[in-house]
Amino acid sequence: MKKVERLFAAISGVSLAIVFVVALAQVVQRYVFNLPLPWATDVVRIFFIYSVFSGMCVGVIRNSHLNIDVLLQIIPQWARSAFGVISNVIVTVFLAVVLRYSIPFIRNNADQYTPYIEYPMSYVYLVFPVTAAVMIIFLLINTFSLLTGKCAKPKGGGV
């Protein structure tokens, strides 16, 4: 599990670094040299999407997604695991819908390319089902652990 977490954390970090460097280069080129980089918007868009979805995976793996700490402080200690299970079920259902509709979405947009670098958008959209599937797997593992009592209480409870 740690290797998967590190992989997605690395993808997210590298993607954010690329977004930063390319956006900075675009600003310098445009305002200092008066020579815009038209391809920069494509690269920033692609790697921003990768960083967001990879970061979501890391949040789910660490069980630090969508925390409502105020609500957790109000409910009794014995109900926090149940709250974590309910939270995981809601997020899993949402991700299952994303997974279900992302595959036809990729198929229907297979003929789209980014304007400047002509990178297939289906490769960009592929991150949707891949990360949704990974998040569902880790949510199911966490839910099973909560139900069997084989893990610590949820960090913040999930929702």
Image (cartoon, rainbow, N blue to C red):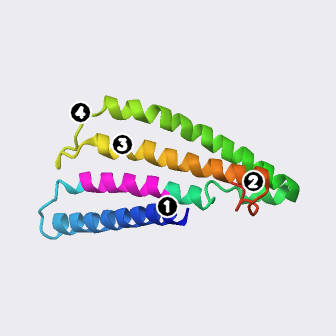
Between marks 3 and 4, how big is the CA–CA gap?
Answer: 12 Å
Q: Is residue 56 left or right of residue 116?
A: right
Q: Quadrant of residue 65?
A: bottom right
Which residue has dot 3 on it? 125
Name the secondary structure under disc 2. Answer: helix
Q: Relative to 138, say whether 115 is above or below.
A: above
Q: Majority secondary structure of the magenta segment?
A: helix
Between marks 3 and 1, how big is the CA–CA gap?
Answer: 20 Å
- Magenta stretch: residue 54 in it? yes
Mark earlier in primary sequence (3, 1): 1
**Dot 3 crowding, Cα within 10 Å, few <14, some 14–19, many 20+:** many
- Magenta stretch: residue 97 in it? no
Mark earlier in primary sequence (4, 1): 1
Mark earlier in primary sequence (2, 1): 1
Q: Is residue 33 left or right of residue 155?
A: left
Which residue has dot 2 on it? 146
Tell us which disc is closer to us: 3 or 2. Answer: 2
Between marks 2 and 1, how big is the CA–CA gap?
Answer: 21 Å
Kindly identify the amino acid type of the residue bearing the numbered disc 3: Tyr
Kindly identify the amino acid type of the residue bearing the numbered disc 1: Val
Q: Which residues are magenta?
A: 42-55
Tell us which disc is closer to us: 4 or 1. Answer: 1
Quarter holding the N terminus?
bottom right
Kindly identify the amino acid type of the residue bearing the numbered disc 2: Leu
Which residue has dot 1 on it? 4
Q: What's the residue at 77%, 50% (across, down)?
A: 147
Tell us which disc is closer to us: 3 or 1. Answer: 1
Mark earlier in primary sequence (3, 4): 4
Rendered location of residue 153, percent (x, y) = 76, 61
Between marks 4 and 1, how big is the CA–CA gap?
Answer: 31 Å
Which residue has dot 4 on it? 111
Q: What's the residue at 54%, 66% (across, down)?
A: 2
